Amino acid sequence: MLLKFTKMHGLGNDFMVVDLVSQRAKIFPDQVRELADRNFGIGFDQLLIVEPPTDPDMDFKYRIFNADGSEVEQCGNGARCFARFVYDKRLTSKKTINVETRGGNIQLNLTDDGVTVDMGVPHLLPESIPFIADQQQEKYLLEVEGDAFSIGAVSMGNPHGVLLVDDVDNAPVDSLGPKIENHERFPNRVNVGFMQVVSRNEVRLRVHERGAGETLACGTGACAAVVAGRLQGLLDEVVDVHLPGGTLKIQWAGEGKPVMMTGPTARVFEGQIYL
């Protein structure tokens, strides 16, 4: 079967985007892993699939698969690319798009500055992240191979652990990231953010993504980092988050309020492949 796709990225976090509204296909985990291979396949951090919604109040359903073939709940950079894709492909003429995801419904807004995503209200209760803890706290102590680390735990529809570091360039992303990702206190594994606070309105961030490793940018990771920083009294309402691939603007007014994320998208190329 011949499958048409678009290669896109948001700040270097790259995606293969497939329209399964106007074409039909079923993509299995082993095929995702083959397609994600950067030497023998298309190469990407995540596969994004556009489907018709199951909820009549939504415009589309949005599914996300990591490079290892696992399906995940949410992807912020992917959400922005999703909005640009469905608009450019004329699957919709709307500039405000309501989308159903595994992690909950979100709203995407196309603007002259890029795409602003209403990422929804962050989940902070341990059982909703999920994270094993007796009660909600601003930060938790997590023991990893005999060392204790202070982390913030947040769900943006997908789980995140956020660590404060003095210098993000020297943070142990490659060594510590996988250990925290697979820690027993995160039953569904976790994305791990290493955040350096520059000022109350500016942070630097690197993210080890669950099932993908370190990526150039992580939208939900940027949102989670700002939420964690705000809860610890370190950040103001609007924060520029500098990732290796570029900068996202994150706004969060506080508990019970949605997180708003604004950033650019880019189309790399169009292609088709036999599955």
Image (tube, rainbow, N blue to C red):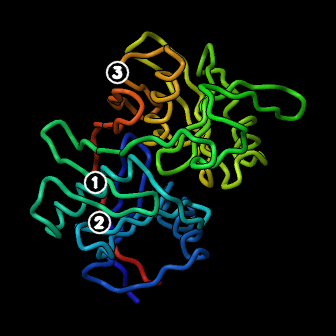
In this rendering, position of residue 168 left or right of residue 223: right
Does residue 157 appear left or right of residue 67 in this picture? left
Query: Hey, which residue is sitting farthest right in the picture?
Result: 146
| Residue 205 coordinates in the image, percent (x, y) | 51, 27
Q: Residue furthest top?
A: 199
Quadrant containing the N terminus is: bottom left
Q: Which residue is mark 2?
A: 270
Numbered badge on residue 267? 1
Query: In this figure, what is the number of numbered marks?
Result: 3
Residues 71 and 157: in front is: 157
Asked whether disc 1 touches disc 2, contact meaning CB atoms under 8 Å apart, the reply is yes
Question: Splitting the image into 4 quarters, where does residue 264 fall?
Answer: top left
Name the residue located 30 percent from the left edge and 72 percent from the top edge: 55
| Residue appearing at x 52%, y 44% in the figure | 155
Residue 201 image-quadrant placement: top left
* Foreground tag (3 vs 1): 3
Vertical placement of 230 versus 89: above or below?
above
Q: Residue visible at 30% across and 60% down? A: 269
Q: Residues within 10 Å of mark 1 (few under 14, many from 20)?
A: some
Question: Mark 3 or mark 1: which comes first in sequence?
Answer: 3
Q: Amino acid at mark 3?
A: Glu
Which numbered circle lies on residue 237? 3
Tell me the SS state at disc 2. strand
- Asked if the residue under mark 2 is in contact with the one under mark 3, i.e. CB atoms within 8 Å, the reply is no
> Residue type at mark 2?
Glu
Q: Is residue 91 above or below residue 44?
A: below
Point out residue 73 in the picture as x, y percentages from the top left corner.
Answer: 49, 58
Task: Give 22 or 235, whichever is nearer the viewer.
Answer: 235
N-terminal-most mark, 3 or 2: 3
Q: Residue at x 26, y 52 (%)?
A: 107
Instruction: Find the distance from the CA under tag 1 to the CA under tag 2.
Output: 8 Å
Of residue 2 and residue 13, the one placed in the foreground of this image is 13
